[in-house]
Amino acid sequence: MSKVNVASLPAEEAATAPKQPEPEPRPSLGRLFLDNLWAANTVTVTVLAVVLAMLVGAVLIIVSDPDVLGTYGYLTSRPSDALNASWTVVSEAYANLFKGAVFDPEASGFTAALTPISETLTYTAPLVFTGLSVALAFRGGMFNIGAQGQATVGVVLAALAGFLLPLPPVLHLIVALVAGALGGALWGFIPGILKARTGAHEVINTIMLNYVGLYFLSWVIVQDGVQNTTRADAISKPVESSAQLPRLLGDNLRVHAGILLAVLATWLVAWLLNRSTFGFELRAVGANPAAARTAGISVPKTYVLMMAIAGLLAGLGGSQMVLGSTANALTPLVIAQIGFDGILVALLGRVKPWGVLLAALLFGALQAGGNRMQSYSGISLELVTVLQALIVIFIAAPALVKAIFQLRAARAARLQTSLAKGW
Amino acid sequence: MAVPDVAVAQVDEGFWTRTRKIGAVLVALGVIATVLFGALATDRSARFTLSETEGGAALEINGTLGAILFGVVAAAAGAALMAGVPKRWFTALLGVGLVAFVLSFLCWQVSAAPEGRNFMPLVNMVRGTFVLALPLIFGALAGVLCERSGVVNVAIEGQLLMGAFSGALFGSISGSVWVGLVAAAIGGALISLLLAVFAIRYLVDQVVMGIVLNLLAVGVTGFLYERLMQPDAARYNSAPRFSSWEIPLLSDIPVVGPALFRANIFLYLGLLLVLVIHIALYRTRWGLRTRSVGEHPTAADTLGVKVLRLRYRNVLLAGVVAGIGGASYTLALYSFTKNMIGGKGFIALAALIFGRWSPTGALLAALFFGFADQLGTYLGAIGSSIPSQFLAMLPYLATMLAVAGLVGKVRAPAASGKPYVKG
């Protein structure tokens, strides 16, 4: 640091002249609660970011509805029409979002009542893995934009293992998961070793590898022995049932064991980061590579291992896209954009493992609710992408949220998720 | 002070200098071309016609002979590099070697094509190369403007997409190409504005912001496409198109004339912009200031350059350029579809890096990537055994090699990606 810390000078003066601090009156519990609520802490900013994003989303819904927009033509003569129409379309859309993601009060029966939660958890599971992948690398000072590519290679190998190998049930699933994990690890290892050996920036290399992986996927699908011969379009053979993750709540609900693996992975990554030697080295490298090197930590080795583990996690997340219940065969769009969403999830979760789990839950809920919103209210699923991006924009700039709501700065300055660094 | 992520020590290279290593690779490529392509090529002639069809004047060579001949040329160029020629010949020899390798490859492919299709229409190839390179040129120029002044622009994809969308929307509503063009520029600038405000004012990590903005652009355009354009395409998605303008005299030049000088406004505009930005960047006061802000903002600030204002202006300018690039799709070629840029923004980023952050370099890189793309289409049409997916990977792999320092040195502007805080 080249700057002199000016703020510390008065503190030193104060230390030389010790003074008995005034005993402050103990604030009441309600007062504390309100203080915390209006301080710009992590929870408040997150909630407000979600609110802001939904407000912008509401504007988008209104301006893209010609009928509602029509009522704004005579806003001055009869404003209630415009307001009522806007309220109806927005509230109905968001009600469906909620019903699709959490609970539908009109649902009757066990299965129907649990369907929203089951859907949410189904979409959550892969996002946890890609989010952890990005978060882990971020803590080590690397920006893994390649979760998409790592998940792609993971899904290819998992699917190949899933329909090419004749294995008994449990073993088959394990082999397929391991294959997916190894594929992802390889795709993470490449930018890691390139960074360690040549200093090539991982942001560029991971972006490039995303597309190499995508073209690899589209090439694999149309190969003999892979492509589904009964179909004309580009789709692979289906993964055998022996390699599929078991469903947790019966065949009518899509939630599968992937969510359990996700919780396990979160716990493992949390342990790895906070309790293990490697985690310590990783955080040290992330905080200051030069100091870590001086302390005897092998920075290149840490980079390589860190990216391989990040890739492994993303590969596991990708594997679930064919081994879980969302699909059972490779298509060019099989992994949707779980890798890019993983970046958002990691940032929203403040690059902490348990935070990532919660963030993935929110994103999974938005996805599940978005499906219902699309089919019941006719609001395009793309709105979910907009909401997700907006939430993260507001999270990434806590200064903005603070300015909008005039929050006080929280003591813990943990809000800044950004690690400013160049190529 | 920032610490370089990995210290790249200057080691004594000994006999195997970089030039010699590249020479060795070129020799290997030449030998492969001579032996493999020579053996696989047929005795039929490979015709490179100077028109759009089979007929007319043509450059013609026996397939086997051509493959072997050009292979030997490539190997000879490599051998010359290994022998230690003066440094100023390096680029020329490398260029000759690579072009000879490609020609050898083409002799094989064209001569081995099925009877009646073993010709290559050069006009189509050149035109296709430029058409496919066009969005890359605009995108890479947008990258140059941003990154030369110290702001990483990963949001090129989003800027292109927003430009394409608003060009289509407002072009359709107004029925005028010029309104569409202006709207496209404003659309691109809008994404740029968000990037600028968040990166410069709120100090959000620029790569993070770029990724999020890409997702936001995909979401917003996809949402409005499904809500407005899909239900009423005649009204919202039928923009008028620029017609081709023929430049007298120049359009009579063989091959280049019909390919380049009977094009629409966007091609001329793109090539003109390369020239203008090149001159502006290296010959004007604005350019000197931009480059100094990108390399050492503190020094520039000391000398009275308004760092932040310059950055705002350049980022907005980049949005305008990329927005027009997006319009080169919707106001000349196709109507808008969801996510129609499909990763071109990231290839533009690759072109920017491959072209070493200079306008002319970016142009050459974009043309190279465009050629790879066009070659893939051509090989598909003649039923080649080379999978098009691998050719599609080429730009990304080439960029990775470049960044890893295997093909020339790549160095980003020093302050790229680092927010500037005065004081």
Image (tube, rainbow, N blue to C red):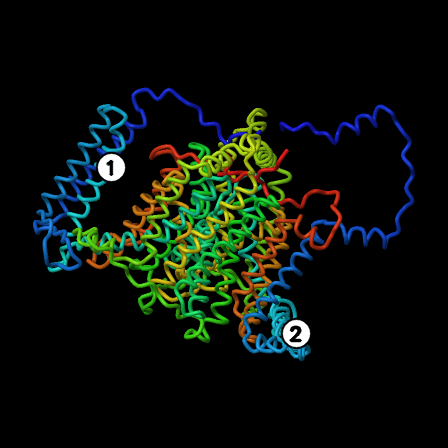
Q: Residues within 10 Å of mark 1 (few under 14, many from 20)?
A: some
Q: Quadrant of the C terminus of chain B?
A: top right
Label 2 sits on residue: A87
Type of amino acid under label 2: Trp
Apparent side of residue B417 relative to residue B99 in the rendered image (left or right): right
Apparent side of residue A308 relative to residue A36 in the rendered image (left or right): left
Q: Name the residue nearer the viewer: B217 or A178.
A: B217
Q: Name the residue nearer the viewer: A380 or A353.
A: A380
Q: In the image, what residue occupies the spot 24% across and 23% down?
A: B84
Any part of residue A269 in sight:
no
Any part of residue B248 in sight:
yes
Where residue B151 appears, x then y in whole percent?
Answer: 51, 42
Where residue A229 appears, x then y in whole percent?
Answer: 31, 66
Q: In the image, what residue occupies the spot 60% across and 43% down?
A: B203
Q: In the image, what residue occupies the spot 39% across and 50% down?
A: B138
Q: Name the residue nearer the viewer: A138 or A311.
A: A138
Type of amino acid under label 1: Gly
State the SS at label 2.
helix
Q: Chain of mark 2?
A: A
Q: Quadrant of the N terminus of chain B?
A: top right
Q: In the image, what residue occupies the spot 45% across and 75% down?
A: B232
Label 1 sits on residue: B95
Which quadrant would residue A23 be assigned to in this image? top right
What is the CA distance from the residue labelled 1 to the residue labelled 2?
64 Å
Q: Name the residue nearer the viewer: B162 or B104.
A: B162
